[in-house]
Amino acid sequence: MNDLSFNFKSEVLDPDEGDEGDWEEDFEFGSDDEEEPAPKPKTDDVSDFPEQGVGFGGFTLPKSGRPPAACWAVNSSHAAVHIAGGGASKALQLLNRQIAVSDFSKLRGAMIGSYLGSLTSMPGVPGSPSMPVPLLQNDVNAHPGEGSLPRTPLKMKDLVAGIRGGYRFFQKGNFNDARIAFASVLVDIPLVVTETRAEGNEVKEMLEICREYITAIRLKIAMADNAKNPVRMTELSAYFTHCNLQPSHLLLALRTAMGTAFKTSNFICAASFSRRLLELPDMSSEKNAQLRLKATKVLQKSEQNARNEHKLNYSESASFSIDCKDFIPIYGGDTSLKCSYCGSIYADEAMKNKVCLTCTFTSVGVQTIGLVTGS
């Protein structure tokens, strides 16, 4: 048997030497001091993309704008424009600051109309809601952008139609209906936006017309209430002729005043009214021939008597304004209060900060900038 020598001596290999052979590590633990950054999450924000690049094919995103209502509030100081944009509180503040409105309930209908009239609704595809579309006033040639203004429903033609309706009622003697018509125009005027200065002047002229006719109608009602007081009735009829009325309506006022003064034996006043009546251009027409003859006879009779039976608080030669509360003359130099909206005048100091009796929704005696007509 052969001796076989087996050497079981283990060889210790130096870890820094030799080949690692096939025992390669399949992973790395990394360093404790350095960490890889977390991958950036995906986003839908278009700001992460370049303005120009392969992904957008050179398309540049437009700048974000403002909603129309926000532009309207910046571009105008007119209350109707702010109401159209939904800024009711700012509109009420403007009306109070500009014309001293204190009773906004009278303007409620016109304000709601201004808001609803500035928008229209365009139907979308089935199953989707309708889209509100603002109606613009200044988009005739091109879209005005941030300089846009809303379209308001109340126009000059609406005011003209209201005044003409009041004229017809006044001519027929329907004074209550006439007063309602003129009062309605007074309510609409603060919410009418004019485009030119000439239109603004016309609106202010309509405001004066409404004031004069409402005052005349109130005087006519007061005359009926004082039918048993001849002195007071004659005074009221005399004030009635000093309202700024249309020539055809002034003719009616002078005819009434002439008859009242003659019946109460105030012949000086009767002669004055008959002269003014005969000087009117309408008196030369054939339809007024009967009235012309009557006025001539009253003038002759009054010049013969030439006396007033009663002393009146009235002077034809002196210029005066009519107190819209007590219906007495307010002469130049007398202290008075004024409505900053319609211009009605009051002699009583107690009317300060009270609601005007003519327009019925503004305060008396508050100094303001006055009616704003343009946008």
Image: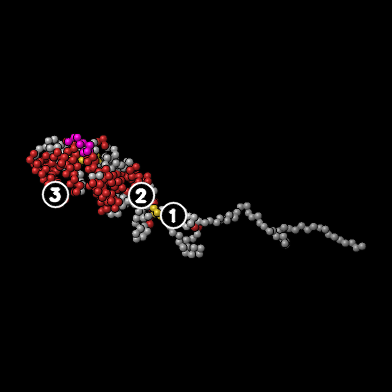
Residue name at image x 28 percent, y 49 percent: 162
The answer to whether marks 3 and 2 mark residues whose Cβ atoms lie closer than 8 Å is: no
Left or right for 47, reference 264: right
- The disc at residue 289 is 3
Can residue 273 be spotted in the picture?
yes
The answer to whether marks 1 and 3 mark residues whose Cβ atoms lie closer than 8 Å is: no
Q: Secondary structure at mark 2?
A: helix
Residue 106: x and y in percent read: 33, 43
Can residue 186 be spotted in the picture?
no
Q: To which residue does mark 1 refer?
A: 131
Magenta-span inclusion, residue 229: yes
The residue lying toward the viewer, choosing from 21 and 271, is: 271
The residue lying toward the viewer, choosing from 295 and 195, is: 295
Residue name at image x 9 percent, y 39 percent: 306
Residue name at image x 37 percent, y 47 percent: 112
The residue lying toward the viewer, choosing from 210 and 301, is: 301
Amino acid type at circle 1 is Met
Tell me the mark number nearer the camera, choosing from 3 and 2: 3
Residue 243: x and y in percent read: 20, 44
In the rendered structure, which disc, 1 or 3, sits on the residue that comes first in sequence?
A: 1
Q: CA distance from mark 2 to mark 1?
A: 19 Å
Stretch in magenta? 222-230
Question: Which of the 4 image quarters holds residue 262?
Answer: top left
Q: CA distance from mark 1 to mark 3?
A: 65 Å
Q: Secondary structure at mark 1?
A: strand
Q: To which residue does mark 2 refer?
A: 114
The answer to whether marks 2 and 1 mark residues whose Cβ atoms lie closer than 8 Å is: no
Residue 52: x and y in percent read: 47, 63
Amino acid type at circle 2 is Ser
Label 2: how many residues lie within 10 Å, few (<14), some (14-19) or many (20+)? many
